[in-house]
Amino acid sequence: MVGNRDEPPKRKVDHRMILASQSPRRRQLLEELGYELTVLPADIDESPLKGETPVKLVERLARQKAEASLAVAAGDGLNDPDRLLVAADTIVWDDAGHVLGKPADAEDAKRMLGELSGRVHHVSSGCCLIAIGAGGTAARAESFVETTDVEFWPLDEAQIDAYVACGEPMDKAGAYGIQGRGRVLVRGIRGDYFSVVGLPVSRLARLIESLRA
């Protein structure tokens, strides 16, 4: 059967993407969506501003990482039109607004896990998406924050010591990785699991569709 000749031709979708992050988890999630990635991490000052809330902080960091990566892309000749650029940042914080970063050492990791034990905390992932336009500049830029509440089981000293001894907490915000052995610490979540992993892919996919509309 011959199709309707009056139908407009389908737009070819460009699946090339710049990822402003070295996170293997973010890379895997985007590659599973079919994107061909060029990794261009951005080096920025991640210090919070005075009076800045965790949600405002993580969105600002995502935007600044995206802008810095776009500048690197220009220098490398990679910011050609129709390519997308994605940056993300994830933070863990408590009800008092205190941000729990990556632990300085094993004792710091134990302290963090003790604070999270038996309680609900928050994980916010900020995401910035840039559609590169003519001249390699940002034709459009949008950002958002996805926050998920995570509840830990009550943890005793032996459980905390065993988890820290495995080494997994040392490069993770809040001293745990929900996608790894840290999953056994989690009693439940309310929100997007993948935002806790580091990239809210469902919401990002919808933002990509809106930018390409």
Image (spheres, rainbow, N blue to C red):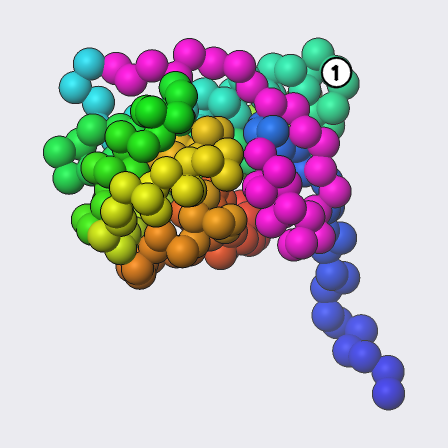
- Residue that appears at 45% across and 21% down: 64
Please provide percent x and percent y for residue 177.
Answer: 45, 43
In the displayed structure, 179 sits above or below 168; it is: below
Q: Which residues are magenta?
A: 23-49
Please provide percent x and percent y for residue 151.
Answer: 26, 53
Within 10 Å of disc 1 (Cα), the crowding (few <14, some 14-19, many 20+) is few
- Please state if 77 lies on the left or on the right of 191 as rendered: right
- Please state if 148 lies on the left or on the right of 211 as rendered: left
The kind of residue on which mark 1 rests is Asp
Residue 39 seen: yes
Residue 212 seen: no
In the displayed structure, 150 sits above or below 169; it is: below
- Residue that appears at 33% across and 14% down: 47
Is 37 contained in the magenta span? Answer: yes
Q: Which residue is mark 1?
A: 76
- Residue that appears at 41% across and 42% down: 162
Is 40 contained in the magenta span? Answer: yes
Count of all numbered marks drawn on residues in the image: 1
Q: Among all residues in the image, which is located at the extreme bottom?
A: 1
Near-viewer residue (36 or 14)? 36
In the displayed structure, 162 sits above or below 171; it is: below
Q: Quadrant of residue 142?
A: top left
- Please state if 187 lies on the left or on the right of 206 as rendered: left
